[in-house]
Image: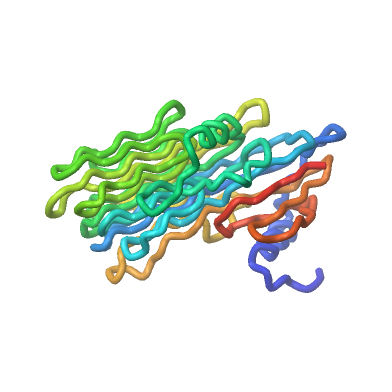
Amino acid sequence: MGVRSTNPIQSFIDDFYRSGTQQQAAPASPGQASGAFAAWGGGGGGGEEGSYGGGGGAVVGTLTLPSGSYTFIVGSKGCSYASPASGFGGAPEKSHNGGGGGGFSGIFNGDLTPFGFQGDGPQTNQDPSSDRDTAHAAAIMLAGGGGAAGQEPKSAVGGGGGGGTNGGQGDPGQGGGGTQTEGGAGGPGNANSGNPGSKLLGGWGPNTQGSGGGGGGYYGGGSGGASTGDGVEAGGGGSGYISPPYGTATLTAGSPGKDPANGTVAATPSPFYPGTAGVSGAGRPHSTRDSTAGAFVIGPYSGASISVTPPGGSPSPVPTSGQAFNTAGKYLLVVS
């Protein structure tokens, strides 16, 4: 049987193959790679008083990639109320005492690694709209990030789940989920309205009170509005996407952060799920649960070779048995 790898990602691939449940890659024409691909969006961040973000969405299917360059993103986890930074996959900064939405994960046609793919917020240099338009038009397969919780205590309030075909709405009645045609609307609030999502970007909450940010996605979720007291301030999840010319996939939404689901990540029974991706967070110190980044998985494939250059690394061949990636960032994938 051989020695078990100490690398948790390689162990996942090894266990998958030893279980006897592996899929056979579909035959591919010369000059293209064909096989199984999957992605999970990052989980939404938690609010200060313990409410949960929405779980990351999932997309699982088969793709055929002609020879050439591609870019894939592993979406960042939604930041907690105590960590202001934005992240990859359109994950916005946190706002006041709310959390930040999770980033989308997925693949694009072309070498788009010069683009930042960062989320929204006053301390972040977002890609110009022209670059986001280019990336949006090049999307092949995406899973949406979960929306963040606002400041409220854990109750019936929580971030919307990542898409799926559509992202979930921040409950109750707050930041809207991204769809296939537009970003989610910002929540109304009683002190200030939230910001809508847009192409790839989750909406950043207004910097007053405790708004939750929207999740990144094909179209990002809207942020919650700013409210006084225990208002309803949760952000919506971002939408997923599949481009039919490249293949087919099943898109599954993550669960909302409200009770009793508490932001469960989508499609965990999939044999490609790498075990920790897309988990939503709850506010500290009221919970020890932190959100987690998304994942991008290359399953068994045939045909042309695939190599991947990770962030700050060198090109490395991907075995035909597949490989999982769950470190947030942007990667260059080459089919040759």
Q: Is residue 263 left or right of residue 275?
A: left
**Horizontal and vertical percent position of residue 101:** 39, 50
**Horizontal and vertical percent position of residue 116:** 54, 47
When asked about the image quadrant of residue 45, the answer is: bottom left
Residue 237 in sight in this render: yes
Q: Residue at x 26, y 62 (%)?
A: 48
Relative to 128, is 260 above or below?
below
Q: Residue furthest right?
A: 30
Q: Quadrant of the N terminus?
A: bottom right
154 and 197: which is toward the camera: 197
307 and 248: which is toward the camera: 307
**Horizontal and vertical percent position of residue 185:** 31, 34
When asked about the image quadrant of residue 230, the answer is: bottom left
Relative to 74, is 137 above or below?
above
The number of callouts visible is 0
Relative to 119, is 181 above or below?
above
Q: Quadrant of the C terminus?
A: top right
**Horizontal and vertical percent position of residue 202:** 40, 43
Residue 259 in sight in this render: no
Q: Residue at x 38, y 54 (%)?
A: 123
Q: Residue at x 59, y 37 (%)?
A: 141
When asked about the image quadrant of residue 30, the answer is: top right
Q: Is residue 183 left or right of residue 28?
A: left
16 and 305: which is toward the camera: 305
